[in-house]
Amino acid sequence: MSHHQDLRSCFCVPHLQHAYKPFITAVLQLLMGVALISLNPTEAPKQAMDFLQWPAMVTILVASWLAASQRAKRRKLAFLGFILGNLLWIVWGLYVEAYALALPDGILCGMNIRGFMKNRTATQRGEPDAL
């Protein structure tokens, strides 16, 4: 059993609904990643790059939630979140040589910049449901 599996089993919460377990596992892994980076300073740069995928994932999930908002300001934040998440995925993808991940994220980043600009322009014109 690996070190990560041992830590995950320590935080098992049986009384929570099954639907929340993947989210809780991801948050715990995120916290464990922060702890692991601080444990071994000589491995910190590599661990920081390995850890980068977690903020990228959380950023994209939060942006996805905000994108469904009926408020234009929240949608603008969503596009900024998507852009940040795409940039994080590009950096991580290039680091692990996952070019099939980095390339589409570069394209998506361009599309999200376009969406942000269109939403910003429509918001300035006063359109409440601008996309």
Image: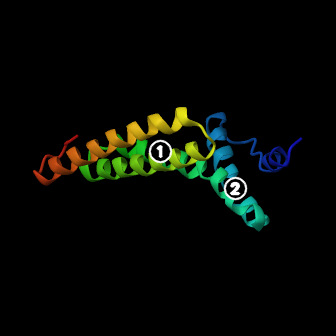
Q: Is residue 105 above or below residue 92?
A: above
Identify which residue is drawn at 77% across, 50% down: 11
Image quadrant containing the C terminus: top left
Which residue is under mark 2?
46
Which residue is under mark 1?
60
- The crowding category of the residue bearing disc 1, from other C-alpha atoms within 10 Å (few below 14, some 14 to 19, many at least 20), is many
Q: Secondary structure at mark 2?
A: helix
Identify which residue is drawn at 63% across, 54% down: 49
Image side of residue 80 versus residue 20, left or right: left
Identify which residue is drawn at 19% across, 42% down: 130
Amino acid at pointer 1: Ile
Image quadrant containing the N terminus: top right
Q: Name which quarter of the figure residue 46 lies in.
A: bottom right
> Is 72 or 107 nearer to us in this picture?
107
Amino acid at pointer 2: Lys
> Is 77 or 10 nearer to us in this picture?
77
> Is 33 or 7 nearer to us in this picture?
33
Q: Residue furthest left?
A: 125
Q: Name which quarter of the figure residue 118 lies in.
A: top left
Q: Residue furthest top?
A: 100
Identify which residue is drawn at 60% across, 47% down: 95
What kind of colouring is applied to the model shown? Answer: rainbow
Q: Position of residue 8 (x, y in %)?
A: 78, 47
- The crowding category of the residue bearing disc 2, from other C-alpha atoms within 10 Å (few below 14, some 14 to 19, many at least 20), is few
Image side of residue 67 versus residue 98, left or right: left
Image side of residue 115 versus residue 58, left or right: left
Q: Secondary structure at mark 1?
A: helix
Image side of residue 86 versus residue 46, left or right: left
Q: Position of residue 4 (x, y in %)?
A: 80, 47
> Which mark is first along the chain, 2 or 1?
2
Q: Position of residue 58 (x, y in %)?
A: 53, 48
Mark 1 to mark 2: distance in Å?
22 Å
